[in-house]
Image (cartoon, rainbow, N blue to C red):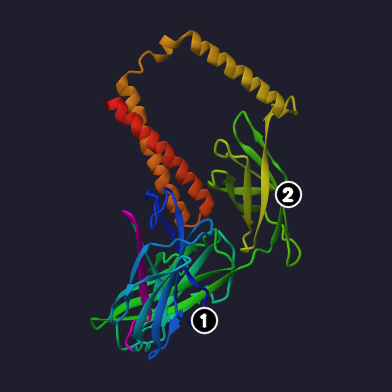
Amino acid sequence: MKTSLFAPLVIAVVLAMVCASYGQLPKGQLITMEVNPDLDKYMPGQRINGIEVSVENFKGEPLDGLNVTGVLKALRQQDLVFENSGSGRYYAAVDYVMAGDDKHLIEVEVSFSAGEESFTKSTYILTTSEERLKLYVNSPKDGAMIAAGQNITFEAEVRPMTDSVSLAGVEVWIIERLTGQKTRIEEKGGVYSKVFTVPRIIGNSLNLIIYAKALEDGVEVDAAEALQLRNRPVLYVEADNARQDLLNGKVALDVRYFDKNGPTVELESLAANITSYPSGIVQSVQLVKEGGSYAGGYRPPKGDTSADILVWDSFGNSGEAGISVVPVIVQPKSTGGEIPWVLVIIAIVVAVGAVAAFALLRPKKAKAGAGPSDALARLEEEKTELEETIKQTKLDFYKRRIESDVANKRITEAEEKLEVVKKRIESAKK
């Protein structure tokens, strides 16, 4: 195969609730699928010879025995039939010569199934077909520096090839090459503008396509531009282990940062994303300057004991640091000081023991009023919450808010609990 002109097109795919056997996947499995045409950009007359797909799980283990199919949605559409060559690789031979009147953006839709579960995702090929529409991307420029989590403004203009022709039904889109996700850019005063939030997980660069299409005298015309925005964290971030107040659950942060490219600019505040572990839940906070550092706080989910802090400033510079959470009880300011966490644990154990003893002495009263209908309602509520957790986790992984190992663990645990709850519901209904 020919060497790709751009970074490989990677499609992140989430699959769940599939039976385990050859050619099938265990429950909660998260899959990464790469779809690689011979080239990422074609000129008229060039031939697409084939499409290769590689599939592996989050541990990097290849997955064979899947039923992989696809469609090349060019001017002359072609079905793609993939053969498994081993090591998680699948190849579909293609014999398509790019025509001068092909669209500037050709969709490659790939599907695969395992058992009863299936998933479909798209990636895109650019062409240099004859220009039929003028597309000007004013900002950002190709090669611009960005930071994960940063808000950047896209501005584009769309014009006909000749001033005497008018356009109708103009649409402009931002397409992420990594996921195939599309974001519509709305028209404002003759310019197409959209504030776009850079995904948190982007690697060394964010590869995008700006695509425009319109109707010119009833005929669809289009244009496309590729953008590669570079990610270069330039902040050195320091963060002390954070103190968690066990009385209100809040974690106090103390963050310092230094600009690697020159003198540190003193800002009044910094934006930050806190990724809490092991849950993987992300929270956005504002860090306010206090003396020589920046202070803020957040409330981690129950059981989380560490976090990554992603910080960025108003110039788009960013950096990361990790922290461990140290539980303490913070006394009122008038008394000062902190109670060591060992004493806190002793106090908690004593309190739990007292509550347990009280419950054992009054078992009948504790159960009073909790009839079968109340118990069933609580189980149904728990079932709904677990199903929502699974759905939201898939969405968070697809949008790259959390890593695959975190998502896989959360889905697996939720599905195991869900099975137990379903059985309890069935028993309660009998």
Task: Say what amino acid the circle numbered 2 marks.
Answer: Ser
Marker disc for residue 3: 1
Could you say whether the residue bearing mark 1 is in a helix, strand or loop?
loop
Q: Does residue 238 appear left or right of residue 406 in this picture?
A: right
Task: Residue 72 in the image: state x and y as whole percent.
Answer: 33, 76
Ranked by sequence position, the earlier of labels 2 and 1 is 1
Circles 2 and 1 in contact, beta carbons < 8 Å = no
Identify the residue at the far left of this view. 218
**For the residue carrying disc 2, how many other residues have a C-alpha within 10 Å: few (<14), some (14-19), or many (20+)?**
some
Q: Residue at x 31, y 76 (%)?
A: 73
Task: Residue 284 in the image: state x and y as whole percent.
Answer: 55, 49
Task: Say what amino acid the circle numbered 1 marks.
Answer: Thr
Q: Does residue 203 appear left or right of residue 293 in this picture?
A: left
Residue 193 on the magenta span: no
Q: Residue at x 41, y 48 (%)?
A: 27
Identify the residue at the far bottom of this view. 45
Choose top left, top right, bottom left or bottom right for residue 192: bottom left
Residue closer to the observer: 178 or 335: 178
Is residue 402 among the parts visible in the rendering? no
Residue closer to the observer: 390 or 242: 390
Which numbered disc, 2 or 1, marks the residue closer to the eye? Answer: 1
Choose top left, top right, bottom left or bottom right for residue 301: top right
Q: Is residue 221 above or below residue 200?
A: below
- The residues colored magenta run 100-117
Task: Residue 113 in the image: state x and y as whole percent.
Answer: 34, 60
Task: Residue 11 in the image: state x and y as whole percent.
Answer: 45, 65
Residue to which mark 2 is pinned: 293
Mark 2 vs mark 1, CA separation in Å: 48 Å
Q: Magenta part mainly helix, strand or loop?
A: strand
Q: Is residue 228 above or below residue 415?
A: below
Is residue 2 among the parts visible in the rendering? yes
Q: Is residue 154 above or below residue 165?
A: above
